Image (cartoon, rainbow, N blue to C red):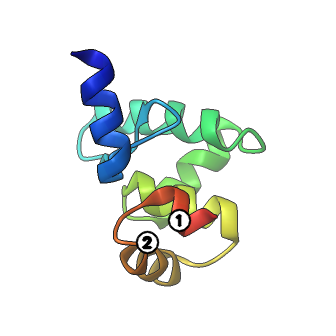
Amino acid sequence: MNAITTSLFIRLGKAHDNLMVDLKATKAKLHDRCLRILCELCPDLDRFGADALLKKADGDLKVAIVMAHTDLGQSESAMRLAEAGGNLRQAIG
């Protein structure tokens, strides 16, 4: 069941490299999880850099990841993600 769910979430763009990335940092626990995922997917970022980037992305983890991989601003990254249908791999590809 877990493998089926994971593959479905990857196809839907909710997971990337087996990590749930369709998250918004709305509470402290989610904010911490977003920071850990952002640091894992963007190894050049330390926790402080990841926190600053997540704030610039208005707490949207997928937008923050696109920003980190493309050096685009928040609105451009959100637009790029929307054009990719929410698929993170396409947006940063």
* The N terminus: image quadrant: top left
Q: Observer-nearest residue: 9 or 37?
A: 9
Q: Specify the amino acid type for callout 2.
A: Leu
User: Element type at marker 1?
Assistant: helix
Q: Observer-nearest residue: 73 or 6?
A: 6
Q: Specify the amino acid type for callout 1.
A: Gln
Disc 2: which residue:
81
Q: Position of residue 56 (x, y in %)?
A: 49, 66
Q: Furthest-right residue in view? A: 44
Contact between labelled residues 1 and 2, with CB atoms less than 8 Å apart: no
Residue at horizontal 51 percent and vertical 35 percent from the top: 37
Q: Position of residue 51 (x, y in %)?
A: 54, 47
Residue 69 visible to the viewer: yes
Residue 55 visible to the viewer: no
Sequence-first tag of 2 and 1: 2
Disc 1: which residue:
90
